[in-house]
Image (cartoon, helix red, strand yellow):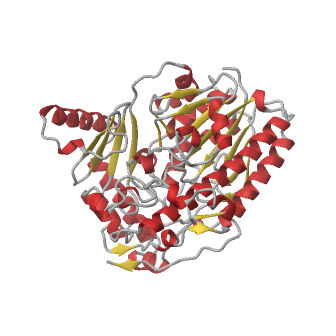
Amino acid sequence: MKPTNLLFILSDQHQAAAMGCAGHSLVRTPHLDRLAESGARFSNAYTNCAICVPARASLATGQYVHQIGNWDNGFPYDGRPRSWMHRLKRAGHRIDSIGKLHFRSDADDNGFTREIEPLHVVEGIGDPASGIRDGSLIRNSRLGIETAGPGPSTYQAYDIRNRDNAIRWLHAHAEDEKPWALFLSFVTPHPPFLAPEELYDLYPLDAIELPPQWRESDWPRHPALDFMRRYFAYERQFEEAEIRRLHAAYYGICTFLDQQIGLVLETLDAAGLRDRTRIVYSSDHGEHLGARGLYSKLTMYEEASAIPLIMSGPDVPAGVVVDTPVSLVDCYPSVLEAVGCPPIEDEDALPGESLWRIAAAENRDRTVFAEYHAVGSPNAYYMLRDRRYKYIYHVDAPSQLFDLRDDPRELVDLAADPDASRRALLSEFEARLRMIVDPEADDRRAKADQARRIDELGGREAVIKRGTFINSPAPGEAPRFRQLDSD
């Protein structure tokens, strides 16, 4: 591939299905749809961990969470190990960031030549209470869902600034000779679930299709899911009207995000950069929106673990839907290849593959991996996903197995099927999983690291007293801590 510039656009908590080009009947994302028409959309793309800090550390380093130890939102990336940003900068490429990073601090060498109005974790610490996973605490997260609707937010204002910063940046670097990379990271559609009124009104409540298994009577019962509902105070089902308002607000924020991306892409065209710039759009994880009685991200269900992924630009086939499974760790080699930065020897051991090459090849079977060691979970769980099946291994709880070809809504857990062929398939998946990770050993290691971090911060009572926050504040906004409740 001939080296070009790279515009890498990342959003936060964008459900993979919430785009017109993904087949959604309501959500209006015309600019992302046109981007997909001009390039390739990956229909089986996944995060490597469905929560912000670990997902973004995996994206940056091209490694899995258990390899780098960024277990939860209290273990932010601090510039170690080396990121693809470091690699580009050391090869002489400009690599700037605009917007949310959710790393430890801009005082660290995160690999960028410049960070423009970054959003990092609170106080360089983040959310260490995520590491208290024994079921003794409750985070009542109902309020943000009950108050979903039209209105402004600091996140909307921040993303408008991110958009304007990107527009100025593109004009300033339109004539650069050496290929550059710009990492533009929007924070929407992450909660708060507030959308500009005119965008909220685009989505009539009676037109919204309710998510799978939203009624309490249909909730899948599994120890890990029951624990999570109790932890976040979701045990009482939300009213149908509340869920419809939540969806309208979320869809409105998705349209808001699409508008900001559209203005950036228009600038790319106006500056004459489109023919010499490759574009990647993705998100760090998805959002449940009430499916299965769950909200936020944090699980291996499609709503939370699947992510949008679109690529466009030179050498990208147009109008292609790629079914080969991929994940965020594939971005590391893809970025290097896009700008013409040759890999070095130790990068051959990274788990990712070039997305450009996957998009240009025939669809094939491939297995991607994800894991979770964070808030709302008593024990680790891990996912393997190939073109047909999704296997979820829970430490100290039953495994799950879904046939996404025949059951794309994940309504039937095949792990409970006593048929011998199902048992053999489960055994095969577990053997494949153990070739990547020792589930129990890394569960113990994560918990030991989390306990050590809590001790470093003064112990359990000090961390609980510090409290937590619903959302990381935008730059210039003070964090609004709230107390954790005891179960």
Which percent across, then down, holds residue 34? 67, 35
Above or below for 278 versus 220: above
Residue at 58% over, 49% down: 27
Displayed quadrant of residue 198: bottom right
Above or below for 237 versus 318: below
- Classify the position of the C terminus by image quarter: bottom left
Residue at 42% over, 72% down: 139
Which percent across, then down, holds residue 83? 59, 42
In-front residue for pair 14/428: 14
Residue at 46% over, 67% down: 241
Do we see residue 210 in this rendering?
Answer: yes
Residue 327 in the figure: left or right of residue 149? left
Which percent across, then down, holds residue 123? 59, 69
- Classify the position of the N terminus by image quarter: top right
Above or below for 125 versus 23: below
Do we see residue 354 in this rendering?
Answer: no
Residue 397 in the figure: left or right of residue 188? left
Displayed quadrant of residue 422: top left
Residue 359 in the figure: left or right of residue 213? right
In-front residue for pair 246/136: 246
Which percent across, then down, holds residue 128? 46, 67
In-front residue for pair 181/170: 170
